[in-house]
Amino acid sequence: MAAARAQIDDHLLQTGAEALGITLFPSQREQFALYARLLYETNARRGLTAVPPEEVVVRHFLDSLTLVRAWLPTAEARVLDVGTGAGFPGVPLKIAFPHIHLTLLDSRHDPFLFLRPLCAQLGLDGVEFVHARAEEAAHQPQWRERFDLVTARAVAHLWALAEWTLPFVRVGGYAIWMKRPSQQEEVEQAREQILRLGGDAPQTVEAPVPHSDIVNLLVRSVKITPTPVQFPRSTARVLREVKRLKVSMQDA
């Protein structure tokens, strides 16, 4: 059984975190071990991850923690993870930096059937759960431009991700999107969109994932002006724009 094999390599986790400049105390490493066990106990029923248990430390935990290469959590920082799924990258950040306030947002109901009991069993305080579509939640006053960091580890094109995330970022806060170096072209394609949404020109940081040959491309933008009120727009409209963008780039 996958759950029975979900015994993480504590040394791999500890040394990988240290390579990122993060010190994990034994109690935190125990939280990661419990996270892995609960993830794979639930995975058969919920389909939360395709990553095998022996790779969870590198491909989920350390991968998520590479965010510190582009942003260092501060005391009481408000962090929003959009499209969180099984909690990546938000929950690993919360375990490593328990002083942050974490909000997990997903449009699907199933992730929260896992995330709510997970955070309770991990003893994580200061975690909020938002079951909503990003384009709807971002128009609500309690969420709009309230966060110090908004992040997403998602497959959507950066043009769309920017519109679904930047409206949540407070002026002076950060959006960081987790991509791969092979997706560098998206950064320039989305530049105009990011500026229109109130972000500054995106910067990129290549962040190798310890104990692997994986490299994350962290795309960071500082929010410098409020997002115009009409954004975010409907998902259908944003995806149509992305499709037109891809076609125009192919024809160029």
Image (spheres, rainbow, N blue to C red):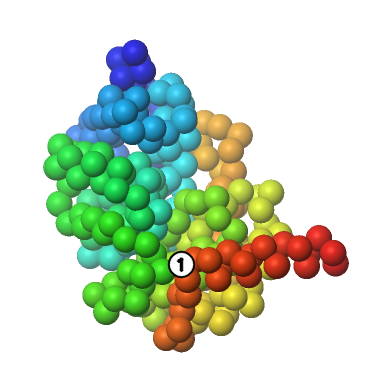
Circle 1 residue: 164
Task: Residue at 43% x, 45% y: name it.
Answer: 64
Label 1 environment density (alpha carbons within 10 Å; few <14, some 14–19, many ≥20): many
Which x, y percent locates residue 173? 39, 73
In the rendered view, does 242 fall on the left or right side of 94? right
Which x, y percent locates residue 1? 34, 13
Q: Can residue 162 be seen in this view?
A: no
Q: Can residue 186 be seen in this view?
A: yes
In the rendered view, does 57 fall on the left or right side of 244? left
| Amino acid at circle 1 | Trp
Q: Which of 123 and 229 is in front in this view?
A: 229
Q: Residue reaching furthest right?
A: 252
Quadrant (top left, top right, bottom left, bottom right) of the C terminus: bottom right
Residue 140: name its quadrant. bottom left
Task: Residue at 29% x, 39% y: name it.
Answer: 24
Which x, y percent locates residue 148? 34, 70
Residue 230: name its quadrant. bottom left
